[in-house]
Image (tube, helix red, strand yellow):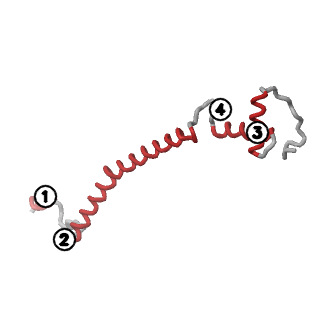
Amino acid sequence: MDKGFEKEGFVTLKIKQSVAKQFKSYSKRLGKSHSISLLLMLEFFDRSGLSPEEQLGPNMQTLELAIKRRLNAMIAIIKDIEKHQTKPTAAMLQALFESAATNPQSPMRVERKENTSAPKFQERIINERE
């Protein structure tokens, strides 16, 4: 008896004899009852979003090729980003650090000296009054 389905009754399905024979051998290979085998197949198609009418190719080669193409496209995008964005930025930073290392006398930061005297227009006014 199938676990979880002990209290459920059986229903008859009408299928062709050749299909029934093929399904019985499939259930034996799975080692499950006919009900569980059919349930597993239905859940697989629901979960994967596949249709039994779709062709997956021998050993899912078509799906594998599609995944490889997408991976190759992603790798190309990452290489392009690295080539046009990351490497030039890294080269600029490296050049800045090297120039700073070769010129230790040049200050890295220039400080502004505050003008403690009065602005020029105020000086003119003061000079005119005198």
Q: Nearer the viewer, mark 1 or mark 3?
A: 3
> Label 2: few (<14), some or many (≥20) within 10 Å?
few
Using the numbered discs, state the Cα–Cα distance from disc 4 to disc 3 in whole angstroms. 19 Å
Report helix, strand or loop for mark 3: helix
Which residue is at a point 77% across and 26% down the rendered structure image?
Answer: 16
Sequence order check, earlier mark of 3 and 2: 3
Question: Tags 1 and 4 in contact by the CB under 8 Å rule?
Answer: no
Front-most of residues 81 and 72: 72
Front-most of residues 105 and 3: 3
> Label 3: few (<14), some or many (≥20) within 10 Å?
few
Sequence order check, earlier mark of 1 and 4: 4
Q: Which residue is mark 4?
A: 52
Instruction: Residue 48: give x, y in percent of width and height.
Output: 63, 39
Q: Which residue is mark 1?
A: 125
Q: Which residue is mark 3?
A: 25
Using the numbered discs, state the Cα–Cα distance from disc 1 to disc 4 in whole angstroms. 95 Å
Sequence order check, earlier mark of 1 and 3: 3
Using the numbered discs, state the Cα–Cα distance from disc 3 to disc 2 in whole angstroms. 83 Å
Instruction: Residue 78: give x, y in percent of width and height.
Output: 39, 49
Sequence order check, earlier mark of 4 and 3: 3
Quarter of the image for residue 8 reads top right
Quarter of the image for residue 112 reads bottom left
Report helix, strand or loop for mark 1: helix
Instruction: Residue 87: give x, y in percent of width and height.
Output: 31, 56
Is 75 positioned to the left or the right of 90 in the image? Answer: right
Residue type at tag 3: Ser
Using the numbered discs, state the Cα–Cα distance from disc 2 to disc 1 in whole angstroms. 45 Å
Residue type at tag 1: Ile
